[in-house]
Amino acid sequence: MPNIRLMLWGVLGAILFLNYQTWMHDYEPPAPAAQSSSATGTGPKTAAPASTLADSLPQAAPAAQTPAPAAPTATPPAALPAPDRAPAAAASETSTTPLHVSTDVLEIGISLKGGELDEADLKEYPLRKDTPNIPVRLLSHEPPPTLYLLQSGLIGTAGEAAPTHLAVWQSDQKSFVLAPGANELRVPLTWTDGAGLTVTKTFIFKRGQYAIGLDYDVKNDGSAPRKLASYAQILRHWEHASRSYFDVETYSFKGPAVYDGTKSKDLNVESDTDSKYSAAISNGWLASLQHQFVAAVVPPAGQTYQYQLQVRNDEYLMSATGPMADVPAGGTVRFHEDLFVGPKLQSQLAAVGRNLERTVDFGILTVVAQPLFTGLNWIHKLTGNWGWSIIIVTALIKLLFYPLSQASGRSMAKMRAVGPRMKQIQETFKDDREKLGRAMMDLYKKEKINPLAGCLPMVVQIPVFISFYRVLLESVEMRQAPFLMWINDLSSRDPYFVLPLLMGGAMFAQFRLNPAPPDPMQAKIMQFMPLIMTGMMAFFPSGLTLYWLTNTVLSIAQQWRVNQVVEAEAAKQRS
C-alpha cells in the first residue's frame, strides 16, 4: 500500500539523515600535519615546547573605532620575544602564586603571570552524577590533554613594554570570595612599566553568572603619549577524536568557533583553510566549544577586532585583538571585553553577546528546535521536572496537529473497514496489475479514502523527532536531569531499557490498530518495525524515547476513538 511504503521511507529517511550528519562529522579528511600529531590518541607523546602558542602575541586590528578619545592607528605592536612559560626569574615565588576566586557558581584560578584564567570549576555541574563532589573543570593549566587557558592583555608599539599575558601582575590579595548577600565581586590586578604607565586589570564576577567582565584602566603619568590595544585569546589542546552517533559526548562539535556579526562558523583545526582563519570583525565573538559547555570572548559592540586562529602541533590559539588607541601623557583610557566560562545556558549567553546563544548547536532544524526548547523551558518552570515537560509538550504538539491527525485517522479507519473488500479485489485481479490498480482507485474514490493521508503524521513527526534529539543532545539544562524512579538522566539512555521496551510494545499495538498491509512482505516488515525501533531507541537519550512513547500512546488513543466513530457512522448508514 502506498501509505505504508511512505511511512517506511519516512522513518528510513530520518535515520539516514542523522547518519549523514554523523558521517560528515566523523570522516572529514584531516590535514596531514594534524594526523602526525594525533596519531596516538592514548599513548605518551613527545612534548612540544611549552612556548609554541602560549607566548604568541597577536596583531592589532586596523579598526576605525577605539575606546580612547584619540583616533586609532594601525601601528603594529611590539614583536616581543617568546620567553618560556615559567615565571620570570626576577619575579619572586610569592608574586606568581595563583589567585583563587570563589563565587556561588565558579571556582576560578588566576595566574599572576599574565593575569590569565587558568582554572575554572563549575560548582553546580558534577562531572558525573555518581560523583557529585567532583565538578566539571572547564579551564586547566595542566599539561595536555587538559590544557585550556583564557589569556588576555594589552599590546603596545615596538620597543615599549606592555602588560601582555606574559607580564607579571600584582595583587594585594591571594583569595577573593563573593560575600553573602553581595551581587558583585571585583578582582583587581596592577602592572606598571616603571616609567609612568600604570594599568589596573579588573575581573568582574556577578552572583549566579558565568559571564566575567574584564576592564583595563590605563593611566599614563609619563611625558610621552602611548599606544595600546587590548586582546583576549583562548589556548587549548586538541587531538583528533572519532565522533559517535550514539555517544552524545563525542557527537557534539569540539573546537574553535567564531561569529562574524552575521553568522557563526565552527572552525576545523584539521582543515588547511580553517586553521589559518583571519578576519576583521565587528560585533562578533569567538569561542571554544564542546558538548554543553563553552568558553567565549565577546569584544565591545561597534569596534572592529582582528580575529585569528593559529594551530601548531596539538594546540590551537583563537584570538581577538582590538584597534590601537592613544593614551595621551597625563591621560587615562579604559578598555573592556566580556568573557564567558561555563555551561551553555541560553538565557545567560544571550545576555552576554550578540547571538552568543548560537554556541548551542541545534543544526539545520534550529527553526523547529529553538521553539521546541523554549516551550520545554517554559513548561519546566511550572513543573520543575524535564520529563513531565517532555510529556506535556508532546501532548501540545499532538493537539496542534490534531486536525491533520484526525483526517489521517479517519482515512486509516475507513481503510480498515473496507479491508475485506480490498482483499476480494486483490484476489479477483491478482493476475492483472493494471485492473487491480484501477479497481483499488475506484474503491478509494467511492469511499472517499485518501491512501496517502496515513503517512502525513509520520512526515510531520520526522523533523520534530530530529529536533527533540538535538534539543536533548545540546541543552545543558537537561544534563543529568532526573524524571521518575530509575530514569535519573534524561540526556542518557535508559539504563534498564524499560522505556524502549514500552515504546516497542506501544508501536506494535499501534500497527495492530491500523489496517494490515495487503502485501505479505509489507506485513512482515511492519511486524518487525517495532523491534527495529526498540533496538535503535535503546541507545538514544531516554528523554527522546519518552517523547516517542508519549506520542505513540496518544496516537493509539486518538486512532482507537476515530475507529469507534467511523464504525458507528458505517453502522448508521447500513441501518
Image (cartoon, rainbow, N blue to C red):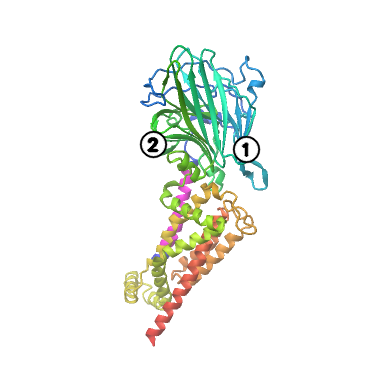
Determine whether 296 is above or below 198 in the image.
below
**Segment colored magenta:** 6-24
Q: Residues within 10 Å of mark 1 (few under 14, many from 20)?
A: few
- Most extreme residue toward the bottom is 575
Please tell me whether mark 1 sits on a helix, a strand or a loop.
loop
Give me the residue at 46% from left, 27% from top. Answer: 335
User: Which quadrant of the figure contains the N terminus?
Assistant: bottom left
In this orientation, does residue 163 appear? Answer: no
- Three-letter residue code for mark 1: Ala
Q: Where does the image place residue 464, in percent across and percent down from the top left? A: 45, 56
- Three-letter residue code for mark 2: Gly
* Residue linked to disc 2: 261
Q: Residues within 10 Å of mark 2 (few under 14, many from 20)?
A: some
Give me the residue at 54% from left, 45% from top. Answer: 244
- In the image, taking residue 181 as reference, residue 547 lies left or right, namely left
- Nearest to the observer: residue 571 or residue 418: 571
In this orientation, does residue 509 appear? Answer: yes
Instruction: Report the magenta stretch's main SS.
Output: helix
Q: CA distance from mark 1 to mark 2?
A: 37 Å
* Residue linked to disc 1: 179
Residue 363 falls inside the magenta stretch: no
Q: Earlier in the sequence, mark 1 or mark 2?
A: 1
Please tell me whether mark 2 sits on a helix, a strand or a loop.
loop
